[in-house]
């Protein structure tokens, strides 16, 4: 004869912990104490501080403007950063740095398009000068040994 179960019906129930789901982002405008302005999605941190999360535009008092994705109060994801000097970066950001695929255009309209690592041109890319001449290859920050010049004949 099979043994009878001595467990009660309540022991069959499993304890379920409620997963903490962060509140949805709020959209609005925030002026920082230094005068910088943020217009976009944010959440309040556990200490009550503002944490940029989602899509937004941050404008500094010096005139730099970042428009793009934020996560953990840092530029993370795709975005574009315009410098007051006229230089522009469009591409991927990780923890406030150019990191991944992107394009950096200098004020004189020459540009580099390719891989970035921690704010540096690092990896496969292409540099185009003000005359439209192109060099392709592997970039290592300020060095680029073995670049190939691409001659375009009209």
Image: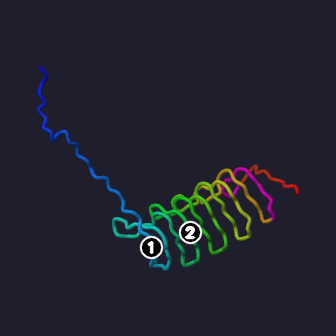
Distance between the Cα atoms at labels 1 and 2? Answer: 16 Å
Residue shown at 12% from the left, 24% from the top: 3
Q: Position of residue 30 (x, y in %)?
A: 45, 75
Residue shown at 77% from the left, 55% from the top: 135
* Number of residues whose C-alpha sits closer than 10 Å to that of mark 2, classed few (under 14), some (14–19) or many (20 or more): many
Q: Are the residues at dot 1 and dot 2 in contact (C-beta closer than 8 Å)?
A: no
The circle drawn on residue 66 is 2
Q: Quadrant of residue 119?
A: bottom right
Q: Is residue 124 left or right of residue 51?
A: right
Q: Which residue is mark 1?
A: 28
Magenta segment: 131-143
Q: Nearer the viewer, residue 98 or 44?
A: 44
Inspect the magenta stretch and tell me whether residue 139 lies in it. yes
Q: How is the image coloured?
A: rainbow
Q: In this rendering, is residue 133 above or below 3? A: below
Q: Position of residue 128 (x, y in %)?
A: 75, 60
Is disc 1 placed on a helix, strand or loop? strand
Q: In this rendering, is residue 117 above or below 105? A: above
Residue shown at 67% from the left, 55% from the top: 114
Is disc 2 placed on a helix, strand or loop? strand
């Amino acid at each position: 004869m099979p043994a009878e179960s001595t467990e009660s019906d309540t022991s069959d129930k499993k304890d379920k912990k409620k997963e903490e789901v962060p509140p949805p982002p709020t959209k609005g405008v925030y002026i920082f104490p230094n005068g910088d302005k943020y217009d976009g999605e944010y959440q309040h941190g556990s200490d009550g501080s503002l944490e940029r999360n989602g899509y937004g535009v941050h404008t500094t008092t010096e005139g730099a403007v970042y428009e793009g994705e934020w996560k953990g109060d840092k530029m993370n994801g795709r975005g574009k950063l315009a410098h007051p000097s006229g230089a522009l970066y469009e591409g991927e950001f990780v923890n406030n740095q150019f990191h991944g695929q992107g394009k950096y255009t200098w004020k004189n309209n020459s540009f580099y398009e390719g891989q970035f690592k921690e704010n540096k041109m690092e990896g496969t890319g292409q540099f185009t000068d003000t005359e439209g001449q192109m060099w392709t290859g592997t970039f290592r920050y300020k060095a680029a040994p073995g670049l190939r010049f691409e001659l375009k004949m009209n």
